[in-house]
């Protein structure tokens, strides 16, 4: 079951936000896309439970796109993101209809569509729920060349692509001790490049759900973004 931290600081969703555009179908899913259509390197961003209309998430997509990547943010929830105010569909109920396993299956046609466009290198970053999808993609043969996980939980280390894990010091679901265990497991897998970092003084959700008026929160989120982009630049270009 998701912890309360998974749902803290919900974003004010805005379907019109971002510098990119929304397309009705990319690999079978509605999606926000940004960046050069002819890029040979692409990044898929997989949202947390609040979905692909979160303004900070789309801003992250736009910034990744400005570095030359074609970016896709699919709507894995089919217009049904988690709404904390909906008392009839609390998070345990909502998760029954939106499993990461289903997200993994729906992500595969998205990656296939990227490769049909001529993309030769694909990376993916996932936040909370999305991190579970991304780690499954990372465990599959030849789907991804690089992966980044944010505030993840319940993940096994059998990955087949370069992977970066960005954790939070005060994350109750993935405390630093668990992050360290995952790092040790990855170290045994000598064929996979990895980067692991725990951000001090921040909690679950820090990199995509924060107040723009909180200078310290903004600084930590920007550092996390820089680490993510650096990982993609090293492994996709």
Image (cartoon, rainbow, N blue to C red):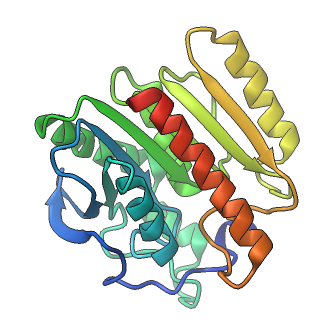
In the figure, 37 relative to 217: above or below? above
| Res 2 → quadrant | bottom right
Question: Which residue sits at x=48%, y=20%?
Answer: 160
In the figure, 42 relative to 130: above or below? above
Relative placement, left or right, of 17 versus 172 is left
| Image coordinates for residue 70, horizontal then vertical, percent | 28, 49
Relative placement, left or right, of 153 versus 177 is left
Relative placement, left or right, of 51 versus 118 is right
| Image coordinates for residue 58, horizontal then vertical, percent | 42, 69
| Res 217 → quadrant | bottom right
The quarter in which the N terminus is drawn is bottom right
Question: Which residue sits at x=53%, y=89%?
Answer: 86
The quarter in which the C terminus is drawn is top left
| Image coordinates for residue 83, horizontal then vertical, percent | 51, 83
Question: Which residue sits at x=66%, y=39%?
Answer: 165
**Is residue 4 visible to us here?**
no
Relative placement, left or right, of 49 versus 124 is right
Q: Nearer the viewer, residue 77 or 184?
A: 184
Question: Which residue sits at x=79%, y=63%?
Answer: 203
In the figure, 127 relative to 194: above or below? below
| Image coordinates for residue 40, horizontal then vertical, percent | 23, 35
**Is residue 125 visible to us here?**
yes
Q: What number of labels is visible?
A: 0
């Amino acid at each position: 079951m998701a912890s309360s931290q998974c749902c803290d600081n919900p974003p004010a969703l805005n379907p019109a936000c971002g510098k990119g555009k929304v397309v009705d179908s990319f690999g079978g899913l509605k999606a926000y896309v940004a960046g050069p259509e002819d890029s040979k390197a692409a990044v898929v961003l997989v949202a947390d439970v609040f979905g692909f209309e979160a303004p900070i998430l789309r801003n992250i997509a736009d910034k990744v796109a400005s570095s030359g990547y074609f970016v896709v943010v699919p709507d894995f929830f089919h217009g049904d993101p988690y709404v904390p105010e909906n008392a009839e569909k609390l998070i345990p109920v909502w998760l029954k209809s939106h499993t990461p396993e289903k997200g993994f299956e729906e992500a595969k046609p998205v990656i296939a569509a990227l490769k049909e466009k001529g993309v030769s290198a694909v990376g993916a970053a996932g936040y909370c729920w999305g991190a579970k999808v991304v780690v499954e993609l990372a465990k599959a043969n030849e789907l991804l060349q690089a992966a980044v996980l944010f505030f993840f939980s319940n993940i096994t280390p059998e990955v087949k692509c370069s992977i970066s894990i960005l954790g939070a010091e005060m994350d109750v679901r993935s405390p630093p001790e668990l992050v360290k265990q995952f790092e040790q497991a990855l170290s045994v897998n000598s064929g996979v490049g990895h980067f692991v970092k725990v951000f001090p003084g921040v909690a679950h959700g820090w990199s995509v759900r924060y107040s723009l008026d909180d200078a310290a929160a903004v600084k930590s989120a920007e550092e996390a973004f820089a680490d993510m982009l650096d990982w993609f630049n090293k492994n996709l270009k």
